Amino acid sequence: MSRRSRANTPVAILLAGLAGGAADILTAFVIYRPATPVVILQSVASGWLGKASFKGGLQAAALGLVSHFAIAIIFAGIFVLAAGQAPVLLKKPLVAGPVFGVCVYGIMNAIVVPLSNAPERHAPTAVMLGLGLLAHVLFGLALAFTASRMLGPKA
């Protein structure tokens, strides 16, 4: 990354995380219908609060929203730091984004969620697995394109 790009790095991480997080949560709102956005965000908060999150109303939903975007920003930081070592990630966001998104899906479902207080879930159906992967591909695309736009070769 150039000197100018390095100066923009914190802003790029923030915006890439917000873009990826927005793509992911909006996709979740569609995928998990008829559950309401409040219930979906309470589900995110269940990582902290367990089953009590579903009785926590809008406060629990707000915790879920903040948590969701905080996690997205952390993953954006990981992506941008990796791109500092492998600039191809910023040059090829159409490839890097989906691959990164699928990796995030794996990390979240194999490590983060099982270590959280979220209630046990049944294994997803093939359709839900595919839709979850799609949501994370969109997450990765939004994140990678935003980072590339801000820090890439033409930034």
Image: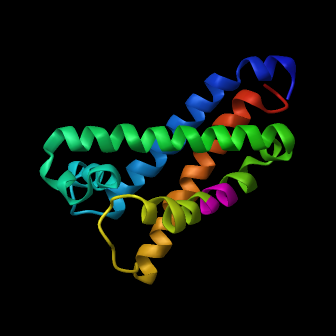
Q: In which quarter of the image is residue 64?
A: top left
Does the stretch in magenta take in 27? Answer: no
Whole-percent x, y for residue 62 in the image: 27, 38
Q: Is residue 55 above or below residue 35?
A: above
* Viewer can see residue 87: no
66 or 5, which lies in front? 66
Q: Quadrant of residue 79?
A: top right
Specify whether 44 is left or right of 149: left
Specify whether 53 is left or right of 90: left
Q: In which quarter of the image is residue 86?
A: top right
* Viewer can see residue 76: yes
- Magenta: main secondary structure: helix
Q: Which residue is drawn at 77% across and 44% down?
A: 82
Identify the image quadrant of the N terminus. Answer: top right
Whole-percent x, y for residue 68 in the image: 42, 44
Q: Residue at x 39, y 42 (%)?
A: 67
Q: Which residue is drawn at 57% across and 30% down?
A: 15
Q: Which residue is drawn at 59% across and 57% down?
A: 104
153 or 53, which lies in front? 53
> Magenta stretch?
98-103
11 or 70, which lies in front? 70
Q: Is residue 53 above or below residue 149?
A: below
Number of numbered discs visible in the structure rendering: 0
Specify whether 17 is left or right of 146: left
Specify whether 34 is left or right of 106: left
Whole-percent x, y for residue 118 in the image: 33, 61
Whole-percent x, y for residue 63 in the image: 30, 40
Q: In this view, does 125 lie above or below 147?
A: below
